[in-house]
Image (cartoon, grey):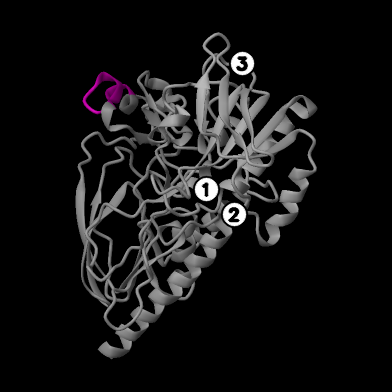
């Protein structure tokens, strides 16, 4: 880490998802020095875990591949993974950021050949599939991982498996003696792009997530549909591996609820509309999707996609928020209970699988930031504005519930604000 040079003219970007990458690149391509920090072993964030974007149903490579190419060719960006910002102190134009960097145990000599993984038998839950399967304790996060370098899980260190991994590496790329490091860097402004996390579905007790195996979340369903996911793209039930052809999608699971998340999470409606098309692709006319909803939020250019799904004879819409979910122990089916508000008919509908369109919670906490940085009632960061506010700018889903397109727009706005701060600081020093 000795080659890191940061000054009051440097912009710190916290979070390496699509928002953080965009903010870093926008600033770097304007000639600014950027320090991009990501807590996981790879850039890409939750966007890299999508099977497809809505509304065009294209793969995330459409956006991430371009950004990765831009990143690799820009010398103004320094990327540090497995790193977390623990403290930011100072004033606009003159901050000191403290960063904790965890060991990867694999050096830049790595060619991603995979020999270390082949030599290791130990497995750990796979966070990139939301724990739906296991992965080797020596692993490449996913095919689009950047840096394209393996990682040794900390649980492997000190075991015979770690020695086997080291012995298998022909490029001397494994360093079992790596230690955690702490960096203190000078920066002029900060873009906080830590993204979002799925709301804990187990807190929505009437829906039985965690008790009933065939109740899953929308982010888990996304991985099931992906050919690179835990089932090779087969949409099956976790309980018995049976094909899930009759699926319930429950909207606003944890959102727009005073007991959980007060805000609308914005992406959930479109995510479920998109996922009904995954069911159609898998099973054709034999598949059946039912969307239980309060309202459908499909504004602007998404309206056409909504109309397309409405016209799909395999998709049914029920205007209702189910009151509870039970399980038929004999079949493993989930039974949704509620009232259809169009006619006020009670129902008890059986489905192979229930998918909770889970709410979006900001991943903001975890660092000491200047007191002037404000949060709204949902925990999203407010942009630093005015002479008394900090130059720590929320971007993407750290600042509000946004889809990918709007997150990148937010990233550009935050980068421009950060550039203004460092330019103003430079003029003051001059």
Q: Find disc 3 in the rendering and name its residue.
A: 242
Question: Residue 277: where, in percent of width, then height?
Answer: 70, 38
Q: For the residues labelled 2 and 1, say whether their Cβ atoms are less than 8 Å apart.
A: yes
Q: Residue furthest front?
A: 344
Specify the label residue 47 is tagged with.
1
User: Would you say residue 227 is visible in this rendering?
Assistant: no
- Please tell me whether residue 49 is drawn above or below residue 190 in the rendered image: above
77 vs 26, nearest the viewer: 26
Of marks 2 and 3, which one's residue comes earlier in the chain?
A: 2
Mark linked to residue 10:
none
Give the residue at x 46% y 54%: 263
Instruction: Left or right? Give the position of 415 relative to 172.
Output: right
Please give the label number shown on residue 63.
2
Q: How many numbered marks does the figure carry?
A: 3
Magenta segment: 156-164
Q: Percent position (x, y) of residue 380?
A: 38, 59
Q: Quadrant of the C terminus?
A: bottom left
Q: Is residue 226 magenta?
A: no
Q: In the structure shown, which secondary structural element does the residue marked by tag 3 occupy?
A: loop
In what element is the residue under mark 2?
Answer: helix
**Which is more N-terminal, label 1 or label 2?**
1
Is 162 one of the magenta-colored residues? Answer: yes
């Amino acid at each position: 880490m000795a080659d890191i040079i940061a000054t009051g003219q440097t912009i710190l970007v916290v979070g390496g998802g699509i928002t953080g990458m965009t903010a870093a690149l926008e600033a770097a391509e304007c000639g600014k020095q950027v320090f991009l920090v990501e807590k996981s072993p790879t850039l890409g964030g939750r966007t890299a875990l999508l099977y497809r974007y809505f509304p065009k149903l294209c793969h995330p490579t459409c956006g991430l591949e371009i950004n990765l190419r831009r990143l690799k060719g820009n010398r103004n960006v320094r990327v540090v993974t497995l790193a977390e910002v623990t403290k930011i102190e100072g004033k606009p134009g003159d901050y000191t950021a403290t960063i904790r960097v965890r060991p990867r145990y694999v050096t830049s000599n790595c060619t991603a050949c995979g020999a270390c993984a082949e030599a290791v038998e130990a497995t750990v839950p796979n966070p990139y599939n939301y724990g739906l399967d296991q992965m080797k304790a020596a692993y490449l996060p996913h095919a689009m991982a950047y840096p394209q370098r393996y990682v040794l899980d900390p649980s492997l260190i000190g075991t015979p498996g770690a020695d086997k991994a080291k012995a298998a590496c022909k490029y001397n790329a494994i360093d079992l003696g790596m230690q955690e490091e702490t960096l203190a860097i000078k920066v002029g402004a900060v873009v906080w792009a830590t993204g979002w996390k799925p709301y804990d579905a187990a807190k929505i007790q009437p829906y039985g997530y965690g008790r009933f195996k065939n109740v899953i979340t929308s982010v888990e369903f996304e991985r099931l549909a992906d050919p690179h996911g835990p089932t090779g793209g087969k949409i099956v039930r976790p309980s018995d591996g049976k094909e899930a052809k009759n699926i319930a999608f429950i909207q606003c699971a944890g959102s727009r609820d005073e007991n959980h998340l007060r805000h609308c999470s914005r992406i959930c409606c479109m995510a479920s509309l998109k996922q009904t098309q995954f069911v159609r692709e898998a099973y054709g006319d034999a598949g059946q999707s039912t969307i239980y909803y309060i309202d459908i939020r499909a504004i602007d250019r998404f309206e056409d996609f909504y109309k397309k799904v409405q016209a799909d004879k395999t998709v049914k819409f029920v205007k209702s928020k189910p009151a509870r979910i039970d399980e038929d122990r004999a079949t493993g089916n989930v039974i949704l209970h509620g009232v259809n508000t169009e006619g006020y008919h009670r129902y008890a509908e059986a489905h192979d699988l229930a998918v909770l369109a889970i709410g979006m919670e900001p991943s903001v906490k975890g660092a000491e930031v200047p007191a002037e940085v404000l949060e709204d009632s949902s925990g999203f960061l407010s942009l630093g504005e005015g002479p008394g506010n900090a130059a720590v700018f929320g971007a993407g889903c750290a600042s509000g519930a946004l889809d990918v397109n709007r997150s990148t727009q937010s990233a550009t706005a935050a980068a421009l604000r950060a550039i203004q701060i460092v330019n103003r600081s430079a003029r003051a020093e001059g």
